[in-house]
Image (cartoon, helix red, strand yellow):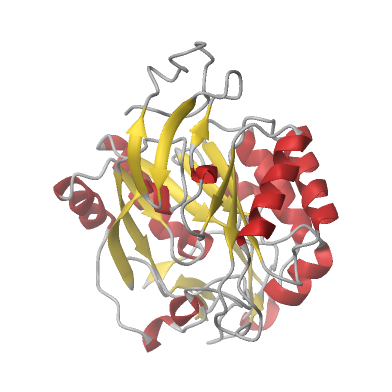
């Protein structure tokens, strides 16, 4: 058992978790909303420290990160539990499970780093479920990875409180942040969370040295209103800048939303068009048959810079992070 960070002791042997904006008050021998943190003898204990249930070597494009060390591999780990309960979750088998109910392996931080080295991975990705809920495991692994010259990636909802965020992001080199939607009503009804803390977190992350990209899964009838998507794009431009890459991805029926249709290519391409019209420079579309919307183009002269097919790089024409044609600088981390 590993003691958790960020909690307060309360009367009646209760504790209050301070890690995420839910501020769970946890009775003795009970768990927080994420299922991964338990009050044992008035100590908050992480039930998932060094217990990944999903381990893989993934292309970094799968995270998705398109402007961060393209065509490299990420050693990827995830655990059971999550502090959101998205009704479409593609990884619900682990994210909505108790840690003891699914198979896992023991893999301490040192072993994670060693595995990354042995698999020729330039990065470690904390992914599959929400990394916030295995915070202590991420933090210690990320510290060791930094010392070993390996970069750290979070794939996250950014539903985390400011102080733990500040401590963690000292060690995080890149993050793909998932905007579930762009209204409080949507977050409350379909994620059992709140939008406002996410927006504050994203602004705080932007102030760090962490490279960020954003993902928005578009779900038919639920968050596919183009007026709301335009509002989201305007917020991104005004608060994060036009250079932040945005990925619109397609929904497939899953978990508790099997009754809905898949997102059409037309919807995704329309969202991309709106984002570009709003002034965002790097907008991508995923989870649909290959289109030119997977590629990176120079915002200046429209030269094709990186050609992609799914998670594969077909051609990379970038020269030292510049367009070879007009020499425009393309924001990103292009080499280790």
- 134 vs 197, left or right, is left
Question: At which x and y percent is residue 270?
Answer: 71, 51
Quadrant in the picture for residue 313: top left
- Across and down, in percent, residue 165 comes to 58, 48
Q: How many marks?
A: 0
Q: Is residue 312 above or below residue 249?
A: above
Question: Viewed as shown, does residue 38 lie left or right of 76?
Answer: right
The quadrant in which residue 336 appears is top left
Q: Residue 59 or 31: which is nearer the viewer?
A: 59
> At which x and y percent is residue 92?
50, 79
Q: Is residue 255 above or below residue 208?
A: below
- Could you tell me which residue is drawn at 74 percent across and 32 percent down? 279
| Residue 179 visible from this viewpoint | no
Rendered-image quadrant of the N terminus: bottom left
Would you say 279 lies left or right of 165 here? right
x 59%, y 35%: residue: 282
Task: Identify which residue, 277 or 95, lies in the foreground.
Answer: 277
> Toward the viewer: 164 or 277?
277
Residue 51 x/y as whole percent = 32, 71
Note whether residue 297 is visible. Answer: yes
112 in relation to 151, above or below? below
């Amino acid at each position: 058992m590993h003691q958790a960070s960020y909690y307060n002791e309360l009367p009646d042997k209760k504790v209050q978790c301070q890690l995420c904006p839910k501020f769970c008050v946890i009775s003795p021998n009970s768990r927080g909303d994420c299922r991964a943190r338990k009050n044992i003898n008035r100590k908050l204990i992480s039930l998932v420290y060094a217990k990944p249930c999903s381990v893989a070597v993934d292309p970094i494009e799968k995270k998705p990160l398109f402007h961060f060390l393209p065509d490299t591999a990420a050693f990827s780990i995830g655990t059971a539990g999550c502090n959101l309960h998205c009704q479409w979750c593609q990884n619900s088998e682990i994210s909505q499970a108790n840690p003891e109910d699914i198979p896992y392996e023991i893999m301490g931080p040192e072993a994670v780093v060693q595995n990354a080295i042995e698999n020729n991975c330039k990065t470690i990705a904390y992914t599959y479920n929400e990394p916030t809920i295995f915070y202590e495991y991420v933090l210690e692994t990320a510290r060791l990875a930094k010392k070993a010259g390996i970069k750290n990636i979070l794939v996250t909802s950014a539903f985390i409180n400011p102080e733990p965020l500040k401590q963690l992001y000292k060690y995080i080199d890149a993050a793909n942040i998932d905007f579930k939607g762009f209204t409080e009503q949507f977050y409350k009804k379909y994620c059992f969370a709140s939008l406002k803390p996410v927006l504050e977190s994203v602004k705080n992350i932007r102030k760090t040295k962490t490279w960020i990209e954003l993902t928005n899964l578009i779900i038919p009838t639920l968050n596919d209103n183009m007026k709301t998507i335009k509002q989201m794009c305007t917020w991104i431009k005004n608060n994060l800048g036009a250079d932040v890459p945005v990925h619109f991805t397609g929904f497939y029926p899953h978990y508790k939303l099997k009754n809905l249709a898949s997102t059409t290519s037309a919807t995704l391409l329309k969202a991309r068009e709106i984002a570009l019209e709003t002034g965002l420079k790097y907008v991508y579309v995923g989870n649909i048959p290959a289109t030119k919307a997977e590629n990176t183009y120079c915002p200046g002269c429209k030269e094709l810079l990186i050609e992609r097919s799914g998670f594969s790089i077909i051609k990379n024409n970038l020269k030292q992070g510049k367009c070879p044609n007009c020499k425009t600088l393309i924001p990103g981390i292009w080499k280790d």
